[in-house]
Image (cartoon, helix red, strand yellow):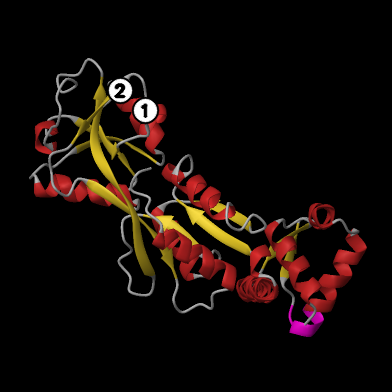
Amino acid sequence: MNTDDLEWFVALAEAPHMTRAAEQLNTTQPTLSRSLARLEHEIGAPLFDRVNRRLRLNASGEILLQHARRSLLELRSATEQIRSARDPDRGTVRLAFLHSVATWLAPELIRGFRARAPQVQFVLTQAATYELENLVAEGVVDLAVTGPRPDTADLAWHPIHTEELCLVVPRDHRFAGRARVGIEAAAGEPFIMLGPDFGLRKITDDLLARAGVDPVVAFESAEIATMESLAAAGLGVTVVPRPRPHRADPNAAYIPLTDDEAHRELGLVWSPARPESPVVGRFRSFVVTERWETL
């Protein structure tokens, strides 16, 4: 099966319009049509239904798309590993990380490593905790910086940094002058939370449960910065990692929590079942052996 035909099929499936896919691939529509016909002949079944001059992936196409993506990913991974084995100083690391570490921890890891291996390239992805674990498990990325520790035994984990958690309130809130506060003190406040699948949400839910607090969730967000802004505006309180000094919302007060479990542990995640290129192994070793607690 021709690799180019598979790549063109995936592009066509993701943009189910022949003209648009041809433009993206920098080829002509007749050439793309011949590629699809060749692939359908080899498979022995049509892969798209033609509906109102548009292509709609059918059941056979859905099956092939799933396997084509996986096959192309494996081929790219093999190519990268071979290149890395020949020249480990010029390989590629596919690194994913939480949105909340995009402005400090992730850049520091990359900057520190590239000081030693300046020719290494990084392909970067940002996502939520549950998405990061899936990306690593499926081999889409080599490594991920996430937290808390994954529940599954299929992924390896090494802690690299611990963040203190704070209650965020407006600057004129009655808690604003306190040095520390127990989360139970906020029992009567509306809470601003991340969605249920986020790692920080699970930590917050556990803190509240231990304190016997059944929170009223006023708003759910997908971004910590949004939660901070809403809390600063007086729309509720929220729990977030202590921000870097230059990243804090100027209209909010960040009060450390007294609970011993009020922290988020960040770590590096990888799949031991998947082969690792020399450059990925070198970067992983660098991250787990350096100290990042002073960041």
Q: In this image, 287 relative to 81: left or right?
A: left
At horizontal 74% and vertical 62% (from top left) the residue drawn is 12
Identify whether 269 is placed above or below 248: below
Closer to us: 173 or 274: 274
**Which stretch appears magenta?**
40-45
Query: Is 189 within the magenta?
Result: no
At horizontal 58% and vertical 68% (from top left) the residue drawn is 279
The chief SS type of the magenta part is: helix
Q: Which residue is mark 2?
A: 252
Q: How many marks?
A: 2
Q: In this image, 157 relative to 29: left or right?
A: left
Closer to us: 84 or 263: 84
Q: Amino acid at mark 1?
A: Ala
Find residue 46 and report its image quarter.
bottom right
Q: Amino acid at mark 2?
A: Ala
Image quarter hosting the C terminus: top left
Q: Which residue is mark 1?
A: 248
Q: Residue 37: x percent and y percent?
A: 84, 74
Identify whether 64 is placed above or below 185: below
Find residue 216 and report its image quarter.
top left
Neighbour tally class for label 1: few under 14, some 14-19, many 20 plus, Cα within 10 Å:
some
